[in-house]
Image (cartoon, rainbow, N blue to C red):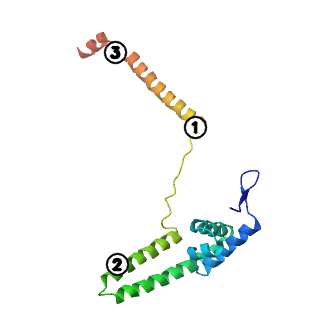
Amino acid sequence: MDRVRNGRGMFVENPGTVERERRAVEMRARGATYREITQELGVDTASAHRMVSRALARVPAEAVKDLRALELLRLEELWRLLARIIQSAVDKPELQLRTIDRMMAVMERTARLMGLDAPPKRVVEVVTDEVLERLIDEEQRAIQAQRDLLTLLADNEPSEDERCQCSS
Protein backbone atom coordinates (compact mmCIF):
# COMPACT_ATOMS: atom_id res chain seq x y z
CA MET A 1 0.00 0.00 0.00
CA ASP A 2 1.47 3.36 -0.95
CA ARG A 3 -0.51 5.35 1.58
CA VAL A 4 1.37 6.39 4.69
CA ARG A 5 0.26 8.01 7.93
CA ASN A 6 1.58 11.21 9.41
CA GLY A 7 2.55 11.68 13.07
CA ARG A 8 -1.11 12.13 14.05
CA GLY A 9 -2.19 8.87 12.38
CA MET A 10 -3.89 10.57 9.41
CA PHE A 11 -3.27 9.33 5.88
CA VAL A 12 -1.00 11.45 3.73
CA GLU A 13 -1.48 10.91 0.03
CA ASN A 14 1.56 10.82 -2.15
CA PRO A 15 1.30 12.17 -5.71
CA GLY A 16 1.46 8.66 -7.19
CA THR A 17 -1.59 7.55 -5.21
CA VAL A 18 -3.57 10.63 -6.14
CA GLU A 19 -2.69 10.12 -9.81
CA ARG A 20 -3.78 6.45 -9.75
CA GLU A 21 -7.06 7.40 -8.08
CA ARG A 22 -7.61 10.10 -10.71
CA ARG A 23 -7.00 7.54 -13.46
CA ALA A 24 -9.46 5.13 -11.81
CA VAL A 25 -12.17 7.81 -11.76
CA GLU A 26 -11.50 8.79 -15.36
CA MET A 27 -11.75 5.16 -16.43
CA ARG A 28 -14.99 4.74 -14.48
CA ALA A 29 -16.41 7.92 -16.03
CA ARG A 30 -15.61 6.55 -19.51
CA GLY A 31 -17.60 3.42 -18.65
CA ALA A 32 -14.88 1.05 -17.49
CA THR A 33 -15.93 -1.69 -15.11
CA TYR A 34 -14.17 -2.15 -11.79
CA ARG A 35 -12.68 -5.35 -13.21
CA GLU A 36 -11.13 -3.34 -16.05
CA ILE A 37 -9.82 -0.77 -13.56
CA THR A 38 -8.24 -3.55 -11.47
CA GLN A 39 -6.52 -5.00 -14.52
CA GLU A 40 -5.27 -1.62 -15.72
CA LEU A 41 -4.01 -0.43 -12.34
CA GLY A 42 -2.95 -3.78 -10.90
CA VAL A 43 -5.13 -3.71 -7.79
CA ASP A 44 -7.93 -5.90 -6.46
CA THR A 45 -11.60 -4.99 -6.92
CA ALA A 46 -12.05 -3.69 -3.37
CA SER A 47 -9.05 -1.40 -3.83
CA ALA A 48 -10.47 -0.12 -7.11
CA HIS A 49 -13.73 0.75 -5.33
CA ARG A 50 -11.82 2.54 -2.55
CA MET A 51 -9.66 4.43 -5.05
CA VAL A 52 -12.72 5.71 -6.93
CA SER A 53 -14.50 6.61 -3.69
CA ARG A 54 -11.51 8.48 -2.23
CA ALA A 55 -10.94 10.36 -5.47
CA LEU A 56 -14.61 11.32 -5.72
CA ALA A 57 -14.51 12.55 -2.13
CA ARG A 58 -11.90 15.09 -3.22
CA VAL A 59 -13.87 16.18 -6.28
CA PRO A 60 -16.19 19.18 -6.00
CA ALA A 61 -19.84 18.26 -5.47
CA GLU A 62 -20.86 19.52 -8.93
CA ALA A 63 -18.52 17.06 -10.66
CA VAL A 64 -19.86 14.19 -8.55
CA LYS A 65 -23.40 15.28 -9.45
CA ASP A 66 -22.44 15.15 -13.16
CA LEU A 67 -20.89 11.69 -12.79
CA ARG A 68 -23.99 10.45 -10.93
CA ALA A 69 -26.23 11.80 -13.72
CA LEU A 70 -24.06 10.03 -16.32
CA GLU A 71 -24.31 6.75 -14.39
CA LEU A 72 -28.10 7.14 -14.14
CA LEU A 73 -28.33 7.64 -17.91
CA ARG A 74 -26.30 4.49 -18.48
CA LEU A 75 -28.54 2.53 -16.10
CA GLU A 76 -31.66 3.81 -17.87
CA GLU A 77 -30.26 2.69 -21.20
CA LEU A 78 -29.49 -0.76 -19.77
CA TRP A 79 -33.04 -0.94 -18.41
CA ARG A 80 -34.51 -0.14 -21.85
CA LEU A 81 -32.31 -2.76 -23.51
CA LEU A 82 -33.31 -5.40 -20.95
CA ALA A 83 -36.99 -4.52 -21.39
CA ARG A 84 -36.68 -5.08 -25.15
CA ILE A 85 -35.04 -8.46 -24.51
CA ILE A 86 -37.94 -9.54 -22.28
CA GLN A 87 -40.50 -8.45 -24.90
CA SER A 88 -38.73 -10.37 -27.65
CA ALA A 89 -38.30 -13.53 -25.56
CA VAL A 90 -41.97 -14.37 -25.16
CA ASP A 91 -41.42 -18.09 -25.75
CA LYS A 92 -38.08 -18.27 -23.88
CA PRO A 93 -38.86 -18.30 -20.15
CA GLU A 94 -35.24 -19.02 -19.12
CA LEU A 95 -34.01 -15.97 -21.01
CA GLN A 96 -36.80 -13.89 -19.46
CA LEU A 97 -35.83 -15.02 -15.95
CA ARG A 98 -32.13 -14.22 -16.52
CA THR A 99 -33.13 -10.84 -17.95
CA ILE A 100 -35.36 -10.12 -14.96
CA ASP A 101 -32.41 -10.96 -12.72
CA ARG A 102 -30.27 -8.42 -14.59
CA MET A 103 -33.09 -5.85 -14.37
CA MET A 104 -33.15 -6.34 -10.61
CA ALA A 105 -29.40 -5.69 -10.50
CA VAL A 106 -29.92 -2.46 -12.48
CA MET A 107 -32.68 -1.43 -10.07
CA GLU A 108 -30.46 -2.13 -7.04
CA ARG A 109 -27.59 -0.12 -8.53
CA THR A 110 -29.93 2.76 -9.35
CA ALA A 111 -31.33 2.77 -5.82
CA ARG A 112 -27.82 2.80 -4.31
CA LEU A 113 -26.71 5.57 -6.65
CA MET A 114 -29.71 7.70 -5.72
CA GLY A 115 -29.27 6.98 -2.00
CA LEU A 116 -32.61 5.20 -1.68
CA ASP A 117 -31.05 2.26 0.16
CA ALA A 118 -29.19 4.40 2.66
CA PRO A 119 -29.81 3.37 6.24
CA PRO A 120 -32.21 5.63 8.10
CA LYS A 121 -30.59 8.41 10.04
CA ARG A 122 -30.68 7.89 13.75
CA VAL A 123 -30.87 10.56 16.38
CA VAL A 124 -28.64 9.78 19.30
CA GLU A 125 -29.18 11.65 22.53
CA VAL A 126 -26.04 11.90 24.61
CA VAL A 127 -26.75 11.92 28.31
CA THR A 128 -23.87 13.43 30.24
CA ASP A 129 -23.25 12.94 33.94
CA GLU A 130 -24.58 16.44 34.58
CA VAL A 131 -27.83 15.75 32.75
CA LEU A 132 -28.24 12.42 34.52
CA GLU A 133 -27.62 14.04 37.93
CA ARG A 134 -30.17 16.77 37.13
CA LEU A 135 -32.79 14.16 36.17
CA ILE A 136 -32.13 12.18 39.35
CA ASP A 137 -32.42 15.36 41.45
CA GLU A 138 -35.75 16.22 39.78
CA GLU A 139 -37.09 12.71 40.48
CA GLN A 140 -35.94 12.86 44.10
CA ARG A 141 -37.64 16.24 44.57
CA ALA A 142 -40.85 14.87 43.03
CA ILE A 143 -40.75 11.83 45.34
CA GLN A 144 -40.11 14.05 48.35
CA ALA A 145 -43.00 16.33 47.38
CA GLN A 146 -45.31 13.29 47.22
CA ARG A 147 -44.10 12.13 50.66
CA ASP A 148 -44.67 15.60 52.10
CA LEU A 149 -48.19 15.66 50.66
CA LEU A 150 -48.98 12.23 52.12
CA THR A 151 -47.64 13.34 55.50
CA LEU A 152 -49.70 16.53 55.38
CA LEU A 153 -52.82 14.58 54.50
CA ALA A 154 -52.17 12.08 57.28
CA ASP A 155 -51.61 14.90 59.79
CA ASN A 156 -54.87 16.60 58.78
CA GLU A 157 -56.96 13.43 58.74
CA PRO A 158 -59.74 13.56 61.38
CA SER A 159 -59.33 11.29 64.36
CA GLU A 160 -61.69 8.38 65.06
CA ASP A 161 -63.60 10.47 67.63
CA GLU A 162 -63.96 13.39 65.18
CA ARG A 163 -65.33 11.02 62.52
CA CYS A 164 -67.86 9.59 64.93
CA GLN A 165 -69.10 13.04 65.91
CA CYS A 166 -69.61 13.98 62.29
CA SER A 167 -71.71 10.93 61.51
CA SER A 168 -74.09 11.34 64.52
Residues at circles 2 and 3 in contact by the CB criterion of under 8 Å: no
Quarter placement of the N terminus: bottom right
Confirm whether residue 32 shows in the render.
Answer: yes
Could you tell me how far apart the alpha carbons at marks 2 and 1 are, in whole angstroms? Answer: 58 Å
Please give the label number shown on residue 131: 1
Residue at position x 35%, y 82% from top?
95
Q: Nearer the viewer, mark 2 or mark 1?
A: 2
| Amino acid type assigned to the residue bearing label 3 in the image | Pro
Residue at position x 64%, y 68% from top?
51
Residues at circles 3 and 1 in contact by the CB criterion of under 8 Å: no
Q: Where's residue 108, x and y in %?
A: 46, 71
Quadrant housing residue 100: bottom left
Could you tell me how far apart the alpha carbons at marks 3 and 1 are, in whole angstroms? Answer: 43 Å
Q: Where's residue 77, x and y in %?
A: 49, 84
Q: Which residue is mark 3?
A: 158
| Amino acid type assigned to the residue bearing label 2 in the image | Leu
Q: Which residue is mark 2?
A: 97
Residue 125, placed above or below residue 51: above
Q: Where's residue 59, x and y in %?
A: 68, 71
Q: Nearer the viewer, mark 3 or mark 1?
A: 1
Q: How many marks?
A: 3
Could you tell me how far apart the alpha carbons at marks 2 and 3 are, in whole angstroms? Answer: 86 Å
Quarter placement of the C terminus: top left
Residue 8, placed above or below residue 61: above
Residue 6, placed above or below residue 148: below
